[in-house]
Amino acid sequence: MNFFLPKQVVRAIDALEAAGYAAYAVGGCVRDQVLGIMPHDYDVCTAASPEEMQRVFENQRTIETGLKHGTLTVLMGGMPLEITTFRQDGDYLDGRHPETVRFTRRVEDDLSRRDFTINAMAYSPTRGLCDPFGGREDCAAGIIRCVGVAEKRLEEDALRILRALRFSARLGFPIEEHTARAIHEGKAGLLRISTERISSELNGLLLGGHAGEVLAEYPDVLGTVLPLRLLTGHEVDWPCSLRRIDYAAPDLAIRWAALLLDAGLETAGVLRALKMPVKLTENVSHLVRECRALDRDVPMQEMLMRLGPDQLRQCLLLRQADRVVRQPDQKETIEADTREKLREAEMLIQGNACCTLGQLAVNGRDMAALGLKGKAIGQTLNALLLAVVRSEIPNEKEALMKRAASMQA
Ligand code: ATP
Ligand code: MG
């Protein structure tokens, strides 16, 4: 197998080895290379203790944030690299965190605490691939399988349930039978996991190319982590919502909107309960609300006013997913129609079409000159903007002043 490691990673491994400590690239970056995917970052693990690591890298800039857990961040030629001492986790008593962290000199011990076989491989240019749990084989077969006894591993840390779903959704790998059974049986463990950790895994899951497919197999897990009580009284067509996810563009706001489209106004509450960022929450609820306006053929320029350029593009893609899933036999027509609509939107955006009060050819002073005061000024300007985006009047000062005057009369 041909592994590529960036030179900064090789230099860090070489420095540790030169000081007598075994060192490997580990986890996601090894998995991705075995799968022929470009890794997005590299983690290193080593037999050196944190103090020993600090000595090896005393001439490098280091960040000590994770030192207690054995992690030192070393800036190698400007690239921040996380280097972690081989660890063996102690007993998990709370289903979230190990009681103790024990450092070890054996890489196999470190790999044995990792979640899935495909994530439990280490590689070093001199030592080669260390793969005690059959990670390479499971990569080749395309299987997500717990390291060790699945029930026990998922009980130790229930977040691994969502991690399994996330990797399955991203890689399109089914989850091995025992692990799958343990997921269904152990899902209640997720109730002990912090909302932030759950949300971050859910986001990763939703962005996967097979997210809907995976969630359709684990509706019980979805039911455990989504605050469904907020949706009582809503006719949510879950099978349809899940199919919508896989068709929708891999953009977090679009994917959440695809999942929660039937939840209507409750969408914001669901995302707030999951402690999602305010910006994402607002973005998703706008998309959910405005998607239906597109059904009503509201003029494109008015949609641009309501959503702004970025959200308008997202909304057109969301609606496309919604329509295709409802009428799969019309897929081609719907996609052609969406392309046409995106082009129309792009013309308006690039052409600087008026869609904000700031672009209107009149302003507050002009309204004051007509004798308008206070609130009436804003209200009139908004009404003028609406008339412009609906193409009732041109965005020209004379026409706008005339309309403003007539509105007063
Ligand atoms: P990604 O490409 O999404 O970053 P990754 O495999 O690097 O995938 P991380 O969450 O960055 O995933 O974790 C790095 C590695 O740490 C994993 O590959 C795995 O070996 C180990 N790991 C992470 N979280 C857990 C966990 N909850 N239980 C056991 N091992 C874990
Ligand atoms: Mg990672």
Image (tube, rainbow, N blue to C red):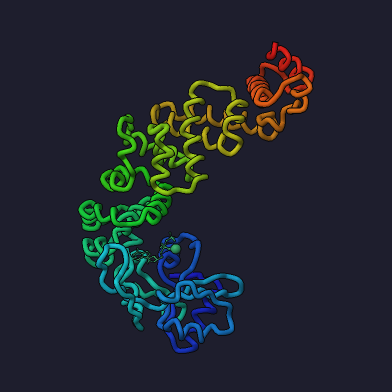
Q: In this view, does 149 lie above or below 327?
A: below
Percent x, y of residue 195: 37, 53
Q: Residue furthest front?
A: 374
Quadrant where the C terminus sits is top right
Quadrant where the N terminus sits is bottom left
Give me the residue at 39% from left, 41% from top: 270
Q: In this view, does 96 lie above or below 76?
A: above
In this view of the protein, which residue sits in the foreground, 7 or 332?
7
Give me the residue at 30% from left, 56% from top: 161
Q: In this view, does 221 lie to the left or right of 74?
A: left
Percent x, y of residue 147: 28, 66
Number of marks in picture:
0
Percent x, y of residue 354: 69, 29
Q: Is residue 107 above or below residue 160?
A: below
The part of the image, by quadrant, that contains residue 162 is bottom left
Ligand 1 visible in quadrant: bottom left
Residue 389 appears in the rendering:
no
The part of the image, by quadrant, that contains residue 362 is top right
Percent x, y of residue 72: 48, 76
The part of the image, by quadrant, that contains residue 259 is top left
Residue 32 appears in the rendering:
yes
In this view of the protein, which residue sits in the foreground, 264 or 310?
264
In this view of the protein, which residue sits in the foreground, 302 or 350?
302
Give me the residue at 50% from left, 25% from top: 293
